[in-house]
Amino acid sequence: MAGPIRGVLFDKDGTLIDFQQSWGPVMGLVADELARGNGDLAEKLLHVGGHDPVSGRTAPGSLLAAGTAVEIAEAWAPLVGTEDITALAAAVDAGFRRHGPDYAVPVPLLRETLDILENRGLRLGVATSDCEGAARDGLERLGLITLFDFICGYDTGHGVKPGPGMVIGFCTTVGLDPTAVAVVGDNTHDLEMARAAGAGLRVGVLTGTGRRAELEPLADVILPGIAALPAVLEGWTGR
Ligand SMILES: [Mg+2]
């Protein structure tokens, strides 16, 4: 039985954090480190990952837009000349974790929007393909960590997107049925995760790498950014 939304599970990068402004510089630093000063190799790593260092844009659905550190490591391993995916994934994670929080640029009205939702009594969570530690560091740095009841990365133990596990984990933690939960994200895998879990509302946002045309078929509503979410939730009584 559809009803009002009582919890919101947010993707992090591209949803809470402005993707292009935040991750462009970080990807460049991590690629430089892994290439050990070989500029051509660093450029190749970014290219394979879907990031164009000249324009600063990351292609929608690409590894660097939507992949986990393990998926990125699998693609980069032959280029950096290693077969140890686990070690390379750990190095990628460590690089993102070291540099990410320094460059995290919040989307417009992030704090204000989360405050409105919290004041209405909604339970809030984060589900990211980043590692949980990096997510916690970044949210701590932005002074937002106490607003969230649930913070989940690809390594938390709830599986990865687009599987339903992160939504189920959030629901279990806060005691809500998936039909009472909105999932908000900038990529198709966020909305596919929402559908797989039976979430009550699927919201696509355009502050990340995903484009309207690809998000629209999977979403109940597309917003320019999360600042428009409180108004949508107020009027939402189910699809
Ligand atoms: Mg995202």
Image (cartoon, rainbow, N blue to C red):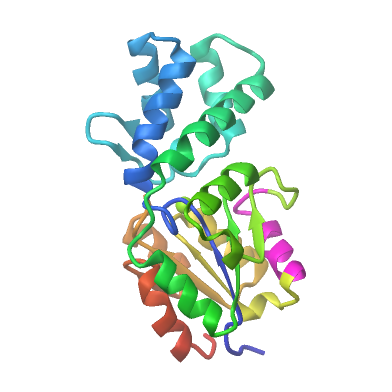
**Quarter of the picture holding the N terminus:** bottom right
- Asked if 228 appears above or below 93 in the picture, the reply is below
- Asked if 85 appears above or below 197 in the picture, the reply is above
Is 28 on the left-hand or right-hand side of 171? left
Q: Residue at x 43, y 67 (%)?
A: 111
Q: Residue 201 versus residue 110: which sits nearer the camera?
A: 110
* Residue 183, x across and y down, in percent: 55, 68
The mark tally for this picture is 0
Q: Is residue 163 magenta?
A: yes
Q: Magenta stretch: dominant SS?
A: helix
Q: Residue at x 58, y 32 (%)?
A: 93
Q: Residue 227 versus residue 177: which sits nearer the camera?
A: 227
* Residue 155, x across and y down, in percent: 69, 43
* Residue 13, x across and y down, in percent: 46, 50
Q: Is residue 170 magenta?
A: yes
Is 223 on the left-hand or right-hand side of 94? left
Q: Residue at x 60, y 53 (%)?
A: 162
* Residue 39, x across and y down, in percent: 33, 12
Task: Give residue 82's quadrant in the image.
Answer: top right
